[in-house]
Image (cartoon, grey):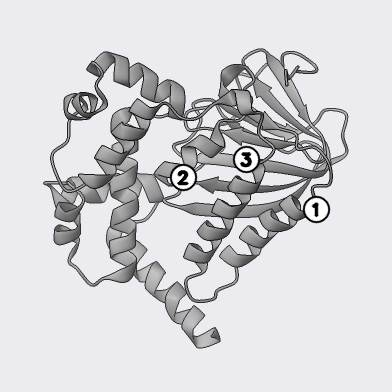
Amino acid sequence: MAWTAEGMYYPAMISTVETPHDDVLRLLTGHFDEAAGYRAYRPNGVGDWLLVLTLSGGGRFGHGAGNFRAEPGDWVLLPPGTPHDYGVADDAARWELVWAHFQPRADWHDWLRWPRLDGGLRVLRPEGDQDALVGQFLHVHDLLGSGQRRADALAMNALEALLLQCDMHNPPETGDLDRRVRRAMAFMEAHLAERVSVEDVSREAGLSPSRLSHLFRAETGQSVQGYLEGARLRRAGDLLRRTSFPVKQIAAEVGFDSPFYFSRRFSRATGYSPQAFRRWSGQSRGAAEQDS
C-alpha cells in the first residue's frame, strides 16, 4: 500500500531544544495521554528503535517530505538514526499513545520492515479489529512495570509476540532482510569477545567493506560498528545483572580491552556506570523477589 503524508512540511524551529534521551539496552515503555503542545525533538534520532501506537486523539510525525498524521490505530516505527520530530497534531486537543524504545534481537529485523515514508519513518495500518494487537502492546507495558521476577525478559518475549502479530499485517512486498546483512549480524553476535573489524564482517558477508556499510545502514538504520557495540553492551548488561563477575572480566567478555573505555561507552549508552547499573538491577530484582 502506498502511504501519503498530510500537511506536508512542518518546519523545525531553530530555537527548539533537543529532547533528552538515553539509549536503552533492551526495552523501555510508556503510556502517555498528552495535551496540545507536547512535542519530542531529536534531530539526529537515537540509537534504539521506537514503536508508537496512537490509541486516541491525533499525533504528528515530521519526516523528510513533511508530516504524517497518526490516527487511532496507526503504528509508527522509527529505526535508529531516524530524526524524531513528533507530538500532538496541530488540530488535535490531545494524543494518547503507547510507546516502546527497544533493541531488537537479530532475527527480529525481518519483522520490522514496514512500509516507509521519507526520512526512514515506517508506518503500519492493520486491517480489521485491532483489539488483540492493542491489548498485547499494553501487556508488554504492564509486564515491564510489574516488578515481578524476570519482568524484563517476560516483557521482551511479549514484545516479540507483538511484532510477530504486526508482521501478519505487513504487506509482503516489503521483503525480508538482506541475507548478507543477516549473515553479518550472526557473525558479530557469535564473536562478541573477539577483535572484529568491518573488514572481518564484510568478508563473512561476501561484500566489500564499503558496500556492506552502505547496505547495513540502509537495511537496519545502524552502522556495522554501531550494531556490534550495541550487541556487546546488551550482553554486558546481562552479565552485570546475572553474574558477580568483576567489571574488568565483563569488559573482556564482550570485546573491550580497556575496562575504563568499556565503562565510558556503557555509561554513555545507558546513563549508568556498570557498577551503578548492577546496583540498580540488584535492587529491582530484590524488590521483585520480595513481592513474588
Q: Is residue 276 visible?
A: no
Give the vertical position of 64 relative to 196 (above or below).
above
Classify mark 3: residues with Cα within 10 Å, few (<14), some (14-19) or many (20+).
Answer: some
Between the residue at mark 3 and the residue at mark 1, the CA separation in whole angstroms equals: 16 Å
* Left or right: 278, with 174 as reference point: left
Res 286 → quadrant: bottom left
Does 287 sit above or below residue 40? below
**Three-letter amino acid code at the position of disc 2:** Pro
Quarter of the figure that contains the C terminus: bottom right
**Mark 3 or 1: the one toward you:** 3
Disc 3, SS: helix
| 227, above or below 82, in the image | below
User: Could you tell me which secondary element the residue under label 1 belongs to?
Assistant: helix
On screen, residue 93 versus residue 261, left or right, reads right
Q: CA distance from mark 2 to mark 1?
A: 24 Å
Tag on residue 167?
A: 3
Please tell me which of labels 3 and 1 falls first in the chain: 1
Query: What residue did someone put label 2 on?
Result: 104
What residue is rendered at 59% in x and 54% in y?
161
Image quadrant in which you'd find residue 71: top right
Residue located at (73% from left, 20% from top): 3
Q: Are marks 3 and 2 in contact (CB under 8 Å)?
A: no
Percent of width and height locating residue 34: 77, 46
Q: Check disc 3 and give the amino acid type.
A: Asp
Tell me the residue that label 1 is attached to.
Answer: 131
Residue 289 x, y percent position in the rendering: 47, 83
Residue 283 location, quadrant: bottom left
The disc labelled 1 sits on which kind of residue?
A: Asp
